[in-house]
Image: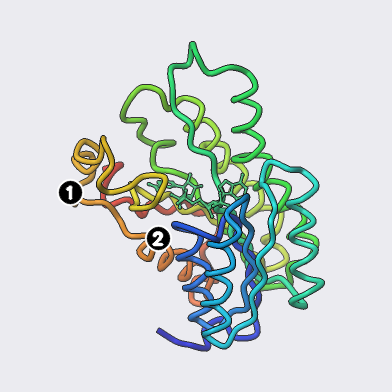
Amino acid sequence: MDENEFSGRTALVTGGSRGIGAAVALRLAAGGADVALTYREDEDSAAAVADKIRGMGRRALAIRADSGDPVALPAAVDRTVAELGRLDILVNNAGRYVTGPVEELDQAEFDRSVAVNVRGPYLASRAAARQLPGGGRIISIGSQVADRTVFPGLTLYALTKSALTGMTKGLARDLGPRGITVNLVLPGPTDTDANPADGPFSETIRGFTALGRYGEPAEIAETVAHVASGAAAYVTGAVIHVDGGFTV
Ligand code: NDP
C-alpha cells in the first residue's frame, strides 16, 4: 500500500467509529489522508479510532452528528473544512438497519430510516458538493439486499438502500463536469456489531454467498480506498458489489 496515496487530502466518513466506517477511516488514514468521522452516541469508540489515526501521524476529528439530523450532518461537513482545511473525500457510511414485517413497522420507523439512510447521504453530499475540489470523491455504502432481498422483513431497509443508486447516478452526472466522481459500494454480509459472523442467522446468511463466508470490514474498505484513489479517476456512477458473490 502506498502511504502517500491520499497525502494532502482530507476525508469525512459518516459512522466512522465502528464496523465498516472505522475500517474505511483507518484505511484512508493509512494511505495518508487526514480524516474526520461522525458517530451517533458511542464517544469512546469514536475517540479510539481518532487516536489510532493520530498515531499514524495524520490529523483526525471525531464529530457527534446523527445522520438523521438535517442540521448536524451538513454542519459536520462544514466543520471538517473549517478544522482540517479542506474536504476531498466524503464517505456516506452510517446506516440504520431495521427489519420486521411490513404490516408492523409504523410510519415513524419509515421516517427515521429514510432520514438516516436517504436524507442524510443526500444532505451530506449536497454540503460536500459545495466544498469538493476537482478530483473530489463521494462514495456511499449501500447494501447487497437492495439487489437481492433474500428473506422477508427487509422492505424498508432495501428501499432506502435502493435510493442510493439513483442518488449516485444523478450526482455522477451533476458533478462529473467538475472532475468529481460519485460511486456506490454494496457490501455483502460483513462481520460487524450490526451483523456478527457468529450471530443467530449467520449460517443461513453465509450460505447466500458464493464464497461461503462473511467479509471483513477491511475488505470493504479496500474497495472504497480504490474508488477514492487517483487510479479510479474514470470510475463514476458505478455500483460496485463487494459481497462474496451474494448477488450472483
Ligand atoms: P455498525 O453497527 O458496525 O457501525 C455503525 C456505525 O455507524 C457506528 O460508527 C455508529 O456510531 C454509526 N451510526 C449508526 N447510526 C448512526 C447515525 N444515525 N448517525 C451517525 N452515525 C451512526 O454498522 P456496519 O459497519 O455493519 O454498517 C455500516 C454501513 O454498511 C451501513 O450503512 C450498513 O447499512 C451497511 N451494510 C452493512 C452490512 C453488514 O453486513 N455489516 C451489509 C451491507 C451494508 P455509534 O456507535 O455512535 O452508534
Q: Is residue 130 left or right of residue 163?
A: right
Up-down: is 61 above or below 213? Answer: below
Looking at the rendered image, the quarter that the C terminus falls into is top left
Looking at the rendered image, the quarter that the N terminus falls into is bottom left
Up-down: is 199 above or below 49? Answer: above
Decide: few, some or many residues near mark 1? Use Cα within 10 Å; few <14, some 14-19, many ≥20.
some
Tell me if the residue at label 2 has its CB under 8 Å from ligand 1: yes
Look at mark 1 in the image and give the residue it sits on: 212
**Which residue appears at 19% of the width and 52% of the height?**
211
Structural distance between the alpha carbons of marks 2 and 1:
17 Å
Residue 220: mark in rendering: 2
User: Closest to the observer: 172 or 158?
Assistant: 158
Residue furthest out toward the top = 103
Tell me how the rendering is colored.
rainbow
- Regarding mark 1 in the picture, which secondary structure is present there? loop
User: Given the image, on which type of amino acid does mark 1 rest?
Assistant: Gly
Which comes before the other along the chain, label 2 or label 1? 1
Decide: few, some or many residues near mark 2? Use Cα within 10 Å; few <14, some 14-19, many ≥20.
many
